[in-house]
């Protein structure tokens, strides 16, 4: 076997090993945060009703997001049963599909460069652009994290990535006879993006393409312009698979909630209380791209040397990837509502840009090892931050913290001390991030998620004989209860969980209910209920952030 063939197999095995880690431990910890439990509960309600059209939460129509994630969860629930693992399976697959699309377009670029007779590999055993970019993508911290949660952002990233790589493929290479089909695929995935996260699914692809033509200072070609005539209807037909039935069934309430409130009002105002400064996404994207941020920065620094108007595949691709990277950052920076996951669609472009420099590094086309040494320094700093965070905020033992950051520490030391061992350094870094995530599941996840959900509190209440008691909130809303206390959690007419602000409201509810009621509240609020003479309060359990009490009339 030739050395180059053996090297290719080694890189393939490395990619497969990291890919397997995407599925490991998806159900190891419960749902956390405000979104995961709600999305899973919406999907469960649709699954139990055998309804693929109208999302509901607590039996109330819930029109915040489109249906693609719910459909993935419903399919997974049907095969594997309702569980955290099944709910997160679709996003994990989406993350790997994103890396697969990155690999495909990287290979297309290499093929186009060979057709143009402009390739010169100094090290034929080193991976090509497709392999390098895919390795960067699959080991990028942001993609790993969002692929392990029940998130719409990774679905949007996946569909936008497929749309944009298909469009770019139509612009490079000599196989012009396939352009029509590549453009058709582009429009189909724009339709899938509409199903993934709404109107932003059409804004990002067309915004990136417009930015690309602006940066390259050229006009769209004739076939691109003509394709709008048939392509936009094709995208709308794909999206209409869900939008048509849901509008027909729910009418104006859906249009108002989905489009007006959760699209235009969310973007133009701070209605949903996620304000951030305009520069918020600059540090966010640098964090999302870890540990490969130094290679991304190196590519951006060298952008001044690009041939911005050249017609060769490499020049076109670099400008396109830059437009893809920048447009979501600019678009969401102008929004009145900002969350970190919004700019995740920029991550595949960052992987392709970083992968370009990584390819040159491993092929020894550049003798500069600064980016690799900086990557090693980043990993060492991340290890130090992990140990400090574990000790100060999560009360983890030093042994546990060192176990989690161990892979980062080793790869960081090698990257700094043996940067000229290029392929070894890259392989260790690719393995280190998923390895650290996997180790954290066994060592730190339980401690980290303990305060973030009420699963164990609900189980404790059931074990103490309160399995049929209705549940309410006091002064706070604990969103994980919407999944773990589903069917028993009380909802108001506006579709929100019932939240009492006054002790007198709790007393009135206890008076109206035959038997005990359960209340989720902050630990500091327990004395206010316990000191009320009309009711008897029994503490059933606490996770440190939320306490569950049983209340009944004396």
Image (spheres, rainbow, N blue to C red):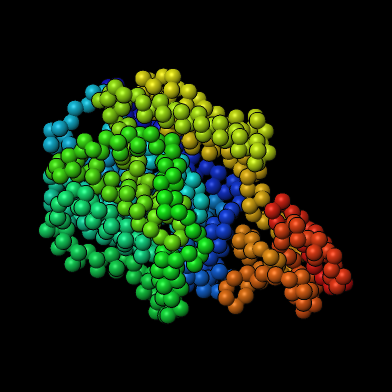
Is 255 left or right of 125, judged from the image as shown? right
Residue drawn at 48 percent across, 64 percent down: 270
The vertical placement of 524 against 47, above or below, is above
- At x 65% / y 36%, what residue is drawn? 391
Q: Quadrant of residue 31?
A: bottom right
Taking 545 as reference, is 493 above or below it? below
The relative height of residue 15 versus residue 544 in the rendered view (above or below) is above
Q: Is residue 21 left or right of residue 27?
A: left
Q: Would residue 188 be visible to someone looking at this image?
A: yes
Specify the quadrant that holds the C terminus. Answer: bottom right
Residue 245 % position (x, y) = 39, 75
Where residue 157 appears, as percent x and y from the top left, is: 38, 52
Task: Please state which of residues 551 and 270 is positioned toward the viewer in this rendering.
Answer: 270
Q: Which x, y percent locates residue 501? A: 70, 70
Which residue is at the front of the view, 298 or 53?
298
**In this picture, residue 329 sits left or right of residue 54:** left
Q: Which of the two residues, 88 or 370, is positioned nearer the viewer here?
A: 370
Q: Quadrant of the N terminus?
A: top left
Residue 418, image x, y percentages: 41, 19
Q: Is residue 165 above or below residue 464?
A: above
Q: Residue at x 47, y 49 (%)?
A: 146
Circle count? 0
């Amino acid at each position: 076997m030739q050395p180059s063939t053996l090297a290719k197999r080694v890189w393939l095995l490395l990619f497969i090993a990291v890919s397997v880690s995407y599925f490991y431990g998806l159900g190891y910890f419960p749902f956390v945060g405000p979104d995961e439990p709600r999305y899973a509960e919406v999907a469960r309600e649709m699954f139990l009703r055998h309804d693929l059209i109208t999302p509901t939460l607590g039996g109330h129509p819930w029109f915040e997001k489109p249906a693609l994630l719910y459909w993935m969860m419903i399919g997974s629930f049907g095969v594997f049963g309702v569980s955290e693992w099944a709910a997160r399976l679709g996003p994990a697959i989406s993350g790997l599909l994103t890396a697969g699309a990155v690999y495909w377009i990287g290979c297309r670029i290499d093929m186009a460069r060979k057709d143009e007779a402009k390739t010169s590999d100094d090290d034929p055993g080193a991976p090509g652009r497709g392999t390098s970019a895919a390795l960067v993508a699959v080991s990028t911290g942001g993609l790993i994290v969002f692929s392990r949660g029940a998130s719409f952002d990774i679905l949007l990233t996946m569909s936008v990535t497929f749309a944009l790589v298909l469009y770019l493929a139509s612009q490079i290479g000599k196989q012009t006879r396939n352009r029509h089909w590549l453009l058709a695929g582009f429009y189909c995935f724009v339709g899938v993006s509409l199903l993934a996260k709404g109107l932003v699914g059409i804004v990002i692809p067309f915004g990136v393409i417009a930015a690309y033509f602006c940066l390259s200072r050229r006009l769209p070609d004739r076939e691109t312009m003509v394709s709008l005539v048939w392509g936009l209807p094709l995208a709308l037909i794909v999206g209409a698979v869900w939008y048509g039935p849901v509008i027909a069934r729910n009418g104006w309430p859906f249009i108002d909630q989905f489009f007006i409130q959760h699209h235009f009002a969310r973007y133009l105002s701070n209605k949903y209380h996620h304000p951030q400064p305009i520069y918020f996404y600059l540090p966010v994207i640098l964090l999302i791209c870890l540990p490969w941020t130094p290679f991304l920065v190196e590519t951006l620094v060298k952008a001044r040397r690009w041939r911005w108007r050249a017609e060769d595949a490499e020049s076109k691709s670099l400008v396109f990837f830059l437009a893809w990277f920048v447009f979501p950052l600019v678009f969401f920076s102008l929004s009145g509502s900002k969350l970190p996951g919004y700019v995740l669609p920029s991550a595949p472009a960052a992987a392709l840009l970083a992968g370009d420099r990584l390819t040159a590094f491993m092929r020894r086309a550049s003798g500069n090892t600064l980016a690799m040494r900086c990557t090693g320094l980043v990993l060492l700093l991340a290890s130090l931050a992990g140990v400090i965070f574990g000790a100060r905020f999560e009360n983890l033992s030093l042994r546990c913290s060192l176990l989690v950051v161990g892979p980062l520490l080793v790869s960081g030391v090698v990257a700094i001390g043996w940067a000229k061992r290029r392929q070894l350094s890259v392989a260790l870094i690719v393995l280190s991030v998923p390895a650290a995530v996997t180790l954290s599941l066994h060592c730190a996840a339980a401690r980290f998620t303990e305060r973030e959900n009420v699963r164990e509190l609900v189980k404790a209440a059931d074990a103490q004989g309160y399995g049929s008691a209705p549940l309410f909130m006091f002064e706070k809303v604990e969103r994980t209860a919407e999944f773990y206390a589903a069917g028993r959690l009380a909802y108001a007419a506006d579709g929100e969980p019932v939240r009492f602000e006054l002790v007198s409201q709790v007393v009135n509810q206890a008076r109206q209910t035959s038997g005990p009621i359960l209340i989720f509240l902050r630990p500091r609020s327990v004395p206010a209920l316990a000191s009320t003479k009309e009711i008897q309060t029994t503490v059933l359990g606490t996770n440190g952030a939320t306490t569950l009490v049983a209340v009944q009339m004396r």
